[in-house]
């Protein structure tokens, strides 16, 4: 822990300070905005940017990860709380913190159980479909705030302000960096500066509200924002633990996936090694920290972390500094935050999430592997049609379905001898010779519950097409493990074949697999033998 | 369809008739009993034994499968309906049919989508844990009926009758077959006759109720059983479709797993080939048929099918005959069914389900693969602690977790040349020579989303331990497929390594994999080359 602090090098300091300032300026509008997405008062988004970031800095293994509010996780929070409490009620706020506490506890438990490998649960196309679906839901959900009225209504002053901010943000996004470069700014710095556009647009919006008296025209603003730091305590509603459990599990899963996929992108660039179990603990602590300090579920955000990285962050000192700066903003007078025009905030949300949409993955998958592309589209459709939480379940089912499907089609080859050699090859691809009565099959996969039936079916098929088979040799050169289901399957094949007068042999069993087989009695009950090589099996069995 | 009928051979007839009669005699008490487990009037269990069995006979691919009520599926039905309606109410019966209809529809859809491979979703230890947990829940649930009062109460006449029947059934189970053999009966027939013990014990119980006037002493009986066949119609409650969806999905899953695992055991013995997609359609039709004829969710039962097989069934004519016989029993006077003593029925349920418990699998797994044994115990504990439906989810999560865990640890070998040969082997196991600056790694698994990160991590590790690496060759001889996630991963490795001045090469790429790679631009963007053999790669790259 804090390895980076003990080995801190002075030349990192400038980068960390610069990145800390930049990320704080990016995090304030994001925090305010994603609190709104979660259905909470804007200030809670700032609370959720302080303690969680510090918790992550203490435990996490990524040097540049920025932990705090994130659009998709905020949407999931709103979706989890919607059936339980009304937005704006005291209960809603309590449940948001309770949910963060449960998400954190789940992540901490997963970290202690060392199940970090679960980050591999989603395929990239499924994750892409989920993200794209979520961003569409979020953008759609912001339209009433952007137009200042429930759709299809329109509040003209709000709509003009919101759409104006939207257009400005889009123009700045593509035009600001090149313009700065033309003005002599270094390209890398120009790119970072362009990320601060939302901050400037929001400040401009606030000025406009004040100077043009937009509040009097009915433009909604953030209203009174309480100043000061959040207190450290956790209120819970005892009757809601059960109802929050399933959402907490789903949110914890997405928090981990989103954070890990972002952190891995940056870790590759920095040649860093992430420890997924430590990441679980760090994200767990961050969420418990958020719960204790008036926040809601948080995660690592790739968009923010990428800015942190690009702005020169070398260690978590950068994100710690961001947290301190945000805390300072809360201690300073916060009256100005009440000017925050909600249509402009909606515009920043829409522009931010639209960048999360990934159509490249769909294009690649469509050309390369149609089934992956269909899984992407199905997840996307699932999120839009059934909702964000159901979308996670659909994504898991599709990923796992793909996995089981692939696993249930192991590669199996019938082998024959290359004449005059000791080599045995797939008879479908090589001119290899077989011996009547002797069937040699090589299984090119680890044997486990997902493919036992497939191997069984292929075995039956090959035996049926070769009447008179007396000996079956399974070549195990590619089998690195056999699970209990496959062990029981092996014992059953042995029995079934025995009833038909066919002996079952094994060949080229790897050392570790052989050692494990010896702990069961399957090896000793085999009707046939275990051969060191396929050639030895063939020589002995062909002699009869 | 009906292939067996078009090719029916006369010498099958005796076996089919005998098995049909035996299975009907077994099915009547089971139907009555499992209807009680489902919380429904006993007669519905007979309804659920007629149309479903005929539907399965028309479509299914197993010759000996017996489809009808089954203990675990009945328990799941009761658990699904408990929060929605009171047992004994009209709504409860309506929802049971509606649930069967939804289960059937789900199965039919799965059959049309050809997702029969999903039968591989559960590992055997997880299935064993689930079954054992369910049987404990069922047996426990029957104790009040056995003792004639809510626990810890006791109604002495009921308890004596129930416990007496229980003891008698246990004695008959182990003693009846040997006794019959000693009396000169063929062992195979004696075994089948012993399966009819529950029928005789129930008949004895009914006699006792009538002769000893047990009803007057307060022993509960089945009460009036309406005679006649069920009408063909389906009542539904429109407000309950949503609430029944999740249970219907879980029950459909278990219906398929239970039926397939039983059918596979018998198919292996008969050298039959099952078609899992046709099985889905057949089970779907059976459940829709059950819904239309006053029944509840049904599935294939291994215990009944095994008796069907042992009694000589050669084709589905046997189970069709059973269905006809049960229908005949309903058309005949049914007044006698009202005598059915519930404590005796409870005793038959307890004895039947206790036979489903599997401790062999636990013993084997404990010795052979501790993690499989722990998955079994966790599923068992999950069913007992959280309930039967949650148990299915826990089982799926554990099976999939195991799968992802295994997948996330692919076997990867660093290769070196066996001096003076063209052979390249794992340097950890053979005295093989490596060339400085050149790293050759063989990936012994298909590349997909579950192991991309693991391969990535191993690559980083090996490169880090060999400073000065300029060329990395991935030997793809064991890679039969690359999914979209892995394709994107490959492109990223290529870029990342390029930034560090390391070229990425591929060797021994299989034909189908190469063809697929060509549909993307990853191959052409590779910084290195694609070699036919590892030796060619090594020769060229070692020269520099």
Image: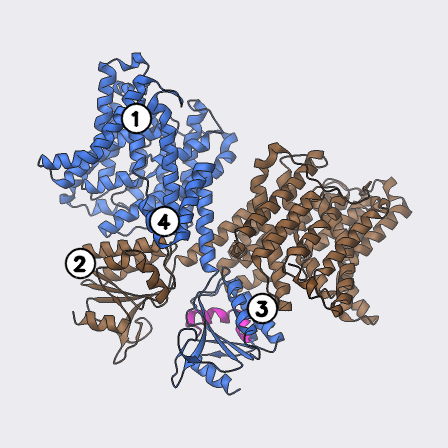
Chain colours: A brown, B blue
Q: Do dots 4 and 1 share one subunit?
A: yes
Residue beneath the point at 62% across and 69% down: A271
Do the residues at pointers 4 and 3 share their chain? yes
Q: Which residue is mark 4?
A: B124
Q: Chain of mark 4?
A: B
Residue B4, position as x, y percentages in the image: 23, 46
Indicate whether residue B473 is drawn in magenta: no
Secondary structure at badge 3 equals: helix
Q: Secondary structure at mark 2?
A: loop
Instruction: Using the numbered discs, state the Cα–Cα distance from disc 4 to disc 1 in whole angstroms.
Output: 30 Å
The residue nearer to you, when weighing A204 against A479, is A479
Do we see residue B72 in this rendering? yes
Label 3 sits on residue: B492
- Residue at figure coordinates x 66%, y 38% from the top left: A95
Is mark 4 in CB contact (under 8 Å) with mark 2?
A: no
Residue B196 seen anywhere in this rendered image of the structure: no
Q: Chain of mark 2?
A: A
- The answer to which quarter of the image holds residue A466 is bottom left
Marks 4 and 3, the one that precedes in the sequence: 4
Write down the region rendered in magenta: B509-524
């Amino acid at each position: 822990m804090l390895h980076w602090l003990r080995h801190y090098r002075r030349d990192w300091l400038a980068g960390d300070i610069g990145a800390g300032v930049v990320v704080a300026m990016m995090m304030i509008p994001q925090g305010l905005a994603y609190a709104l997405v979660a259905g909470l008062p804007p200030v809670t988004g700032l609370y959720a940017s302080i303690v969680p970031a510090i918790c992550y800095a203490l435990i996490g293994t990524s040097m540049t990860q920025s932990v705090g509010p994130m659009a998709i996780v905020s949407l999931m929070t709103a979706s989890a709380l919607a059936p339980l409490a009304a937005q704006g009620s005291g209960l809603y706020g309590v449940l948001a913190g309770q949910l963060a506490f449960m998400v954190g506890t789940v992540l901490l438990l997963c970290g202690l159980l060392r199940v970090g490998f679960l980050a591999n649960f989603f395929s990239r196309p499924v994750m892409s479909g989920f993200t794209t679906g979520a961003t569409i839901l979020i953008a759609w959900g912001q339209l009433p705030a952007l137009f200042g009225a429930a759709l299809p209504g329109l509040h003209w002053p709000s709509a003009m302000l919101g759409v104006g901010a939207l257009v400005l943000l889009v123009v700045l996004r593509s035009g600001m960096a090149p313009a700065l470069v033309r003005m002599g700014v270094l390209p890398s710095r120009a790119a970072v500066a362009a990320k601060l556009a939302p901050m400037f647009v929001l400040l401009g919006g606030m000025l406009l509200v004040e100077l043009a008296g937009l509040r009097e025209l009915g433009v909604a603003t953030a209203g009174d924002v309480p100043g000061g730091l959040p207190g450290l305590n956790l209120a819970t509603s005892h009757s809601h633990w059960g109802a929050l459990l399933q959402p907490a599990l789903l949110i914890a899963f997405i928090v981990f996936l989103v954070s890990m996929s972002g952190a891995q992108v940056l870790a590759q660039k920095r040649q860093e090694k992430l420890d997924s179990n430590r990441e679980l603990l760090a994200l767990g602590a961050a969420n418990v920290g958020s719960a204790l300090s008036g926040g809601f579920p948080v995660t690592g955000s790739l968009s923010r972390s990428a800015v942190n990285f690009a702005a020169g962050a070398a260690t978590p000192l950068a994100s710690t500094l961001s947290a301190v700066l945000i805390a300072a903003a809360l201690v300073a007078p916060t009256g100005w935050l009440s000017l925050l025009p909600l249509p402009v905030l909606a515009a920043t949300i829409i522009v931010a999430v639209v960048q999360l949409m990934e159509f490249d993955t769909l294009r690649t998958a469509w050309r390369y592997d149609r089934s992956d592309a269909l899984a992407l589209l199905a997840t996307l459709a699932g999120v839009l049609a059934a909702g964000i939480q159901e979308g996670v379940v659909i994504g898991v089912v599709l990923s796992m379905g793909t996995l089981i499907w692939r696993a249930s089609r192991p590669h199996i080859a019938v082998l024959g001898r290359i004449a005059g050699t000791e080599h045995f090859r797939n008879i479908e691809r090589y001119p290899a010779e077989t011996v009547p009565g002797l069937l040699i099959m090589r299984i090119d996969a680890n044997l486990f519950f997902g493919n036992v039936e497939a191997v069984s079916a292929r075995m039956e098929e090959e035996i049926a097409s070769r009447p008179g088979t007396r000996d079956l040799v399974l070549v195990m050169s590619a089998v690195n493990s056999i699970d209990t289901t496959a062990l029981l399957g092996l014992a059953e094949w042995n029995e079934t074949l025995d009833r038909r007068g066919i002996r079952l042999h094994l060949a080229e069993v790897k050392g570790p697999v052989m050692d494990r087989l010896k702990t069961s009695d399957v090896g000793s009950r085999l009707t046939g033998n275990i051969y060191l090589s396929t050639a030895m099996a063939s020589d002995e069995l062909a002699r009869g």
